[in-house]
Image: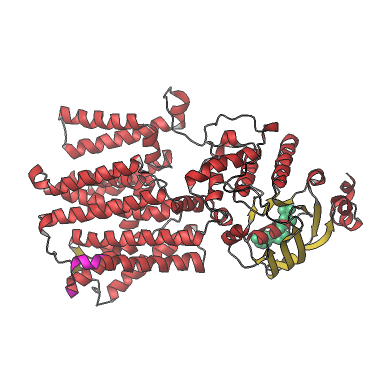
Amino acid sequence: MIRRGGIGLLVAFLVLVAVGAFSDPLGLPSFYLILLGSICFWIAQATSWNILSGYSGYFSFGQAAYVGVGAYTTAVLSGRHGVNFFLTVPLAAVLCGLLALGVGAVAFRLGSLRGEIFALLTLAVPFILAAFARINQSIDGGQGTTVPVPEVPDAFGSLPELQYLLALLIAAIAVAAAYAIQHSRTGSALAAIRDAEDVAEVLGVATFRYKMLAMLISGVLGGVAGSVYALQIGFVTVESVFGLTIPLFVIVMGVLGGRTHWLGPVIGAVLIVTLQDRLSSYGLDAWNSIILGGVLALLVAVSPDGLYARLRARPLVSLGSLVVVGGGLAVLNVWGEFLDWLVVGMLVAALLAIVLGSRWATARLPLGRRARTTAEPVPAEPAIAEPAIADPEPAEAEAGTPGDEPGAVLVECRQVARYFGGVHALEDVTLDIRAGELVGLVGPNGSGKTTLINLLSGAFRPTRGVIRLDGQDITRMAPHKIAHVGMARTYQIPRPFDSMTVRDNVAMAIMFGREPLPLHRARPIAERHLATVALDHLADAHPADLNLHQRQLLEMARAIASSPKVLLLDEALAGLNPAEVDNAVRVVRRIHESGITIVIVEHLLRVLNQLATRLVVLDRGTCLADGEPQTVLNDPAVIRAYLGRQAHV
Ligand SMILES: Nc1ncnc2c1ncn2[C@@H]1O[C@H](COP(=O)(O)OP(=O)(O)OP(=O)(O)O)[C@@H](O)[C@H]1O
């Protein structure tokens, strides 16, 4: 199915091709083609940056590396070795792809770098490459290289036309790629990585693979655009392609326009390049950075989600103000020319959309359709809908694993130990969990319960020992593979994907679970899982709109949606009031009855008395007791070590 955005993209591309192809008959000054070519270059670069940094949240300062390698590949090969320009473009793509994979392998495999450390690593790459270009005479020794004018094919008419159409083509490819990724499984994976990477991995997302894919696409697009840029500027120097301007501009454009949508960098690039051009035309180059920085600071402060979200929430107001202000200035013709009117119109439209979308305005003005902000309450039924726990329907992605023989060993821990430096969090834990059990895992604070959950789900690896799930050795398996074998978990402090709706949080688990489905098929099944935990009435809400109990229930719905054999619940009832605890107990029991084996870490003994078929007590990292709940609770060793008088509840 072709979406509206895709059709709009195609129409815009064809119109812009026509503008280039008929620029002479249209009498379009060549200045406009150059400006459009520049906008296209920045759209391609900002979009390339956004596919990695916006979609996955890995903030890169290294975009100049791709621009530089792409531009120098073309400049050196065509300028010094006479290689046809059109052959240098794919070579630039290959080199930049390899560079991106190399940086990705170092960052993601060797170091698992994130945040500012990842940003610093990416910042170092263009510095190294720039220094290499300066000292290496076979590149240009820092002197700069002229890019010869290639033979312009007849169809293109003139060089400016060729430059513009090439820049347009790479911008269109970049935007189409960003569009396709955003609407694909890869886009969902990258969004989950951005929101909570380790949770995504535990849900079955092969995070390393998706990050490398984003790196590769970003690098190839950046390199090809750099190669075309070399032809645009005609003379490539280290400063012009490896400088800090490139990463700063793409970041400004991406953040300003909006990082989570394919259109964000396009909006940012159009606004910034035209604004910059106008400032230059009025001799305000010196003010360029000050004004751009000021506009960015203001817009980011009042609209951190970027302009796209605000414009989309107010399409008519935005378009109307652009037409009225821009058109009004044109009709009055008291000042400036077309581009001035356009820029003023765009700025007014942007500011209006931001002001109208602000909390202040939405609270005070009767504005009709409002932008959704996380501060707005979602109309919600009471959190505890007592009898509303729906029957889990057998579906394509089943909630249980009825095929597992009741009583068969599902999880085997053999002499498992985990040390953190000198802290022996777990020591020689040997444990079997059988299909159909609901095992309560208890013990004093620091006894190793969460560590055991982390080992079973693959978040940590044991220092020693073996763990098997359904007969498969998962001791050193990646968490997403363990999820595919059949392990799911929840977190003591809920860790939802904040940018997704409640429904899509659950759908993610189905998309990347044991029986993967595309998003449109996962969504209806997600709603059934939400009904299982009585949260279906909040399917369209965002996690920020939920209370703690609802967020805990969302964790459970998401975990069962991955069709696990074993569900690990880490203090899923912590912080709840008594009524909420009772509701959560019913939900857990319901999940258990659907055929899922459960291990629950819990401090509330009355809950475990109601729920557990068996209790395992940890004390200082070792297994102190294991058996039927009443027997364990009355074990003198357990009472001494942990339970005290409470054991007699
Ligand atoms: N990532 C870590 N780095 C260092 N030490 C850790 C780490 N995780 C756990 N520990 C230590 O391992 C021991 C067991 O911690 P763990 O969180 O597993 O206990 P717990 O039984 O879950 O406690 P609680 O009931 O308070 O959650 C503690 O001494 C803790 O400080």
The image position of residue 385, as x and y in percent, is 67, 32
Is residue 455 depicted above or below 377 in this figure? Answer: below
Q: Is residue 375 left or right of residue 370?
A: right
Specify the farthest residue to the bottom.
137
Give the residue drawn at x 44%, y 59%. Answer: 119
Query: Is 299 included in the stretch rendered in magenta?
Result: no
Give the residue drawn at x 35%, y 59%. Answer: 63
Specify the farthest residue to the top.
366
How many numbered discs sit on the rendered protein? 0
For the question of whether residue 516 can be seen, the reply is: yes
Give the residue drawn at x 39%, y 58%. Answer: 61
Quadrant, the N terminus: top left
Residue 619: image quadrant is bottom right
Q: Nearer the viewer, residue 214 or 10?
A: 10
For the question of whether residue 447 can be seen, the reply is: no
The image position of residue 37, as x and y in percent, is 21, 51
Give the residue drawn at x 74%, y 34%. Answer: 579
Is residue 508 depicted above or below 231 in this figure? Answer: above
Quadrant, the C terminus: top right
Q: What predominant SS class does the magenta segment belong to?
A: helix
Is residue 626 depicted above or below 548 in this figure? Answer: below
Q: Nearer the viewer, residue 623 or 18?
A: 18
Tell me, what colour scheme is on the image? secondary structure
Ligand 1 positioned in quadrant? bottom right
Q: Which residues are magenta?
A: 81-89
Q: Is residue 284 left or right of residue 369?
A: left
Q: Nearer the viewer, residue 398 or 136?
A: 398
Q: Is residue 485 left or right of residue 580?
A: left
The image position of residue 151, as x and y in percent, is 12, 64
Q: Is residue 556 left or right of residue 445?
A: left
The image position of residue 513, as x and y in percent, is 56, 53
